[in-house]
Image: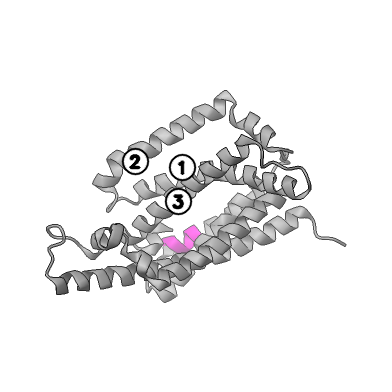
Amino acid sequence: MGVSDNTRGLILAMASSAFIGSSFILKKKGLKRAADSGTRAGAQSGLLIGSIMSIRNTSVYLGVGGYTYLLEPLWWAGMVLMIVGEVANFVAYVYAPAVLVTPLGALSIIISAILAHFMLKERLQKMGVLGCVSCIVGSVVIVIHAPQEHTPNSVQEIWALATQPAFLIYVAATLSAVLALILYFEPRYGQTNILVYLGICSLMGSLTVVSIKAIGIAIKLTLEGISQVAYPQTWFFLTVAAVCVITQLNYLNKASLALSMLEVL
């Protein structure tokens, strides 16, 4: 008896959560190492970095291009795990509908919270445990009671859905909110209020899901002999996905620097 596409998608989604959840911890340790080494290097060279800056802030602005964590091997190890997890998540969208795959991303929060408790010595409080249990229960309920979803058969069909007025209004509102968070709120409140980075990553993530689904369908159809490469919509969705993912990674790193991993999760 063969394995159904939905089962393949669910297995890949759970594997993706395991890789991504572990990657957060490695990246956090790499960021902390980069912050420590950057601070020591600044002190030894006698340079004045800003006026009075905490380790939380220095690691963002020190080094070549302002990103010294790019020189930290542990951060790259976490990035490799994240890439593997994202690839698994990407393939999961090819086999299973988004309404089944997306909720399972919450499992990465559980894994990261547990690893942060033991590896980063960030104590998981009772409310944190309750939050983890709520994530598990919510994911199970959504997966069990997920409605039947019509799967688009081509990139053009997704494009037709994505260009409907209701969705265009949502995209405009989302991008406006993201720009407001980046240009106004992040410089003022980013280091103290987790909702700023949470808002940026979550809003961009909603656009990422649509783009990844479109790319997954395009790849699947192309492998089946129905090439989608010549359609400009395929490249548009690919560009949107790349911009969204890079933006999310950038602000996730900033959140990891400014706040504890449990707060970020």
- Which comes sooner in the sequence, label 2 or label 1? 2
Which residue is rendered at x = 52% and y = 67% of the image?
Answer: 81
Can you tell which mark lies on residue 246?
A: 3
Q: Main secondary structure of the magenta part?
A: helix
Does residue 40 appear left or right of residue 178 in this picture? left
Residue type (three-letter) at the residue carrying disc 3 = Ile
Which image quarter: residue 166?
Answer: top right
Callouts 3 and 1 close, C-beta under 8 Å: no
Residue found at the far front of this picture: 230
Image spot of residue 49 (x, y percent): 16, 61
The quarter of the image holding the N terminus is: bottom right
- Which comes sooner in the sequence, label 2 or label 3? 2
Image spot of residue 247 (x, y percent): 42, 48
Numbered disc 2: secondary structure: helix
Q: In this picture, which residue range is highlighted in magenta?
A: 127-132
Disc 2/disc 3 C-alpha distance (Å): 16 Å
Q: Is residue 29 above or below residue 58?
A: below
Can you tell which mark lies on residue 181?
A: 2
The quarter of the image holding the C terminus is: bottom left
Callouts 2 and 1 close, C-beta under 8 Å: yes
Which residue is rendered at x = 25% and y = 58% of the image?
Answer: 61
Does residue 11 appear left or right of residue 36 in this picture? right
Q: Nearer the viewer, residue 205 or 262?
A: 205
Residue type (three-letter) at the residue carrying disc 2 = Leu
